[in-house]
Amino acid sequence: MLIENGKEILRAFDDREHKSQEILEVTDGVWFARGVGHSNAIFVEADESLILIDTLDTLERGQKLRSAIEERCRKPVRTIIYTHGHPDHRGGAGAFEDTVSEIIAFSACKPQLAGMERLSGIQGLRARRQFGYGMSDEEAVSQGLGPREGMNYGEHKGTLDPTTVYDQELVVRTIDGVELELRRLPGETDDQIAVWIPKAKVLCCGDNYYGCFPNLYAIRGGQYRDIASWIESLGQVRDYPAEYLLPGHTGAIMGQEHIREVLENYRAMMQYILDETLRGMDAGKTADELAEEIRLPRELSELPYLGEHYGCVEWTVREIYAAYMGWFDGDPAKLHPMPVRERSLRLTELMGGEAKVLEAAEAAMDRGEAQLALELCSMAEQSLETDVLQAETFSQSELRKALELKARALRTLADMETSANGRHYYIACAKEIENRIV
Ligand SMILES: [Zn+2]
């Protein structure tokens, strides 16, 4: 979400949520480690050993976790359970390589699109932009869900592959005397599970819930995260008689009633956005119109755990539109649009040329209209790159001006953005431009 003091709101959220480190024994024999890594980890005391649920994001942080575990419980970690496949939950596993004998995970409930691996180049670039890799702490402000990943400080991945991969819906196991229920609950990922420890009334929900607006769409790009399934999964998580809800990021939630209320609100938020988007689509509205229109009702938007510091409503609406109807929004002008550079060239001509467009962009910046300035700069840039005659005469200095102004607009938008992912993306793109014009 863009708002005048977006950066300050994001910083306040980060200070409140991610600055403290705690290893809390939430109930007899169940510890919750928060703030040690980007994600959380949970360890459970069994008869002769420990069961570790998720392992933090890097080997170095896994080692820190291991020292903290050894201070509290002199039993080895023999079992690791991954709540899902994201690397920020698996990267610390290597710290337990010498003691662990079984690593449990679930398969994805549906296969990835064939050829997805061929997008590793662009997905890597967009992930670096989204996560703010290579930025200073001051620049990044926050990584949204937790303390910044250890990779930002030169740490390394120590991921271990699972040794047991289930493809069932539900697995009930007694591991070294501890009864566990592992339930498939697709949400943020298709391999997501919840781990229920009935005796302790502890529920580990992975990334199906965390205390800010979820990444229902990740701007780094990827396959659709099926929101209808995620809603269904949250209903199931809500219905456990849990006294302790331990999420993959942000703080624990205690008390059955409170847990139910939080999960129901989280579920209601997703249901609202899905319903409003589908209703608007069926009424013939475009993705642009719906992204502009749909806002959460205040009783949801003001909840402290629904702040738009990671995902946001607008991107979610666009993603639902694309998932259900594809790229075409119904406007016949978009069936065969003009080539984008040609369009910029022609419109720039109509506006009186690149110099005039850049003058207007500068004026827009002065008025605080950074988005308009950004769009005008992109148009002038494309026009200059297309117009060969201009390029021979004055386009180099004009192009430089367009790029400088564009980088400024991106940095202004970054400071208005409440989502860490959005902030990083703007800044990363500004830096790419600045490096180009040095
Ligand atoms: Zn995560």
Image: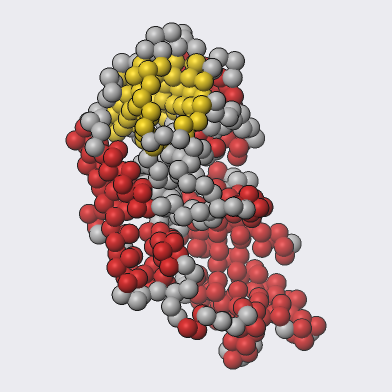
Check the picture and name the quadrant holding the N terminus: bottom left
Q: Residue furthest left?
A: 257
Tell me residue 247's x, y (percent).
37, 35
Going 38% across and 28% down the picture, which residue do you hit?
A: 171
Relative to residue 315, is residue 203 depicted above or below? above
Is 70 located above or below residue 282 in the figure?
above
Q: Nearer the viewer, residue 235 or 211?
A: 235
- At x 66%, y 59%, the residue is 432
Residue closer to the observer: 120 or 258: 120
Q: Residue 351, image x and y in percent?
A: 58, 89
Residue at 50%, 34% (x, y): give it.
89
Could you tell me if residue 116 is visible in this image? yes
Number of numbered discs present?
A: 0
Which of 250 and 214 lies nearest the eye of the viewer?
214
Quadrant hosting residue 376:
bottom right
**Could you say where residue 120 lies in the image, as x and y percent from the top left?**
64, 50
Q: Is residue 424 visible?
A: no
| 220 and 130: which is toward the camera | 220
Residue with the most extreme right position: 392
- Please tell me whether residue 402 is drawn above or below residue 306 in the rendered image: below
Whether residue 390 is situated above or below residue 32 in the rendered picture: below
Q: Position of residue 248 (x, y in %)?
A: 42, 35
Q: Identify the residue shown where x is 55% and y is 14%.
A: 99
